Amino acid sequence: MCALVAGLAAGYRAAGVAVPVAGGAAVLLLVALGARRRRPGIRRRSGYYTSDELLELDTQGLALAVARMLRRDGWRVRMTSAPERPHLCAKDKGGHRLEVAFRPVAEPLPDEDPLHPHQRRGDTSPLRLVVHRGTFRARDVRWAHREGRICLLDGTALRRWAEGTRLNDLLAGQL
């Protein structure tokens, strides 16, 4: 704080009253932006959630939260949902495609097919991301490894992502 006041005083001596006025305006702007960003509604719409907020969400709310976090990370997101089983399709600027499913367990339901079974020529299969607020069992991890191009995002990784870690950093080069 003392350094800020000393800087404003030195600026006043060097350039006149414009420096302290501009400095005060900058401080007020930063305080206003900080206060606004801390408001829960704005923070959530920007794709940032607390651990408690994630726990309070139902499956549809979790799908909306994941869509917002993907948009925060630069993905274009499209929700293709059935009320009881939401799915997201996303594409980033690099052309990587991602399909997101929300499950209590990682295995697909018997009546569920991949979202886009027909591939265009030259397309690579999308990475499938299975989001779960808890922890996956060893059989779920084996299933994902056996299937290939499937990533499991458990509760710990989901909380880190909600706090601001980029998805690319969490998936560590799997995209």
Image (cartoon, rainbow, N blue to C red):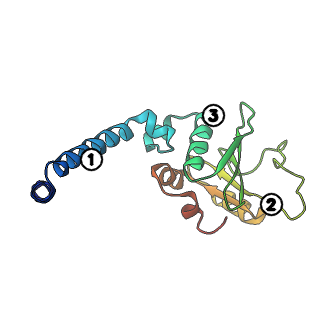
Expressed as whole percent of the image width and height from the top left, the position of residue 58 reads 58, 33
Earlier-in-chain disc, 3 versus 2? 3
Residue at 82 percent across and 44 percent down: it is 112
- Relative to 164, is 66 above or below? above
Q: What residue sits right under mark 2 in the picture?
A: 125
Q: What residue sits right under mark 1 in the picture?
A: 26
Q: Can you say which quadrant of the picture contains the N terminus?
A: bottom left
State which quadrant residue 143 falls in.
bottom right
Q: What residue sits right under mark 3 in the picture?
A: 60
Neighbour tally class for label 1: few under 14, some 14-19, many 20 plus, Cα within 10 Å: few
- How many marks are shown on the rendered structure? 3
Label 3: state its secondary structure: helix
Q: Amino acid at mark 1?
A: Ala
Q: Is 150 left, or right, of 48 in this rendering?
A: right
Earlier-in-chain disc, 3 versus 1? 1
Compare residues 58 and 30 and report the one nearer the observer: 30
Expressed as whole percent of the image width and height from the top left, the position of residue 140 reads 68, 57
How far is the residue under mark 3 from the one under mark 2?
A: 25 Å
Neighbour tally class for label 3: few under 14, some 14-19, many 20 plus, Cα within 10 Å: some
Q: Amino acid at mark 2?
A: Ser
Mark 3 vs mark 2, foreground winner is: 2
Compare residues 98 and 82 and report the one nearer the observer: 98
Q: Is 135 left, or right, of 24 in this rendering?
A: right
Q: Amino acid at mark 3?
A: Gln
Question: In the image as oriented, which residue stretches furthest toward the top?
Answer: 83
How far is the residue under mark 3 from the one under mark 1?
A: 40 Å
Q: Can you say which quadrant of the picture contains the C terminus?
A: bottom right
- Relative to 4, is 68 above or below? above
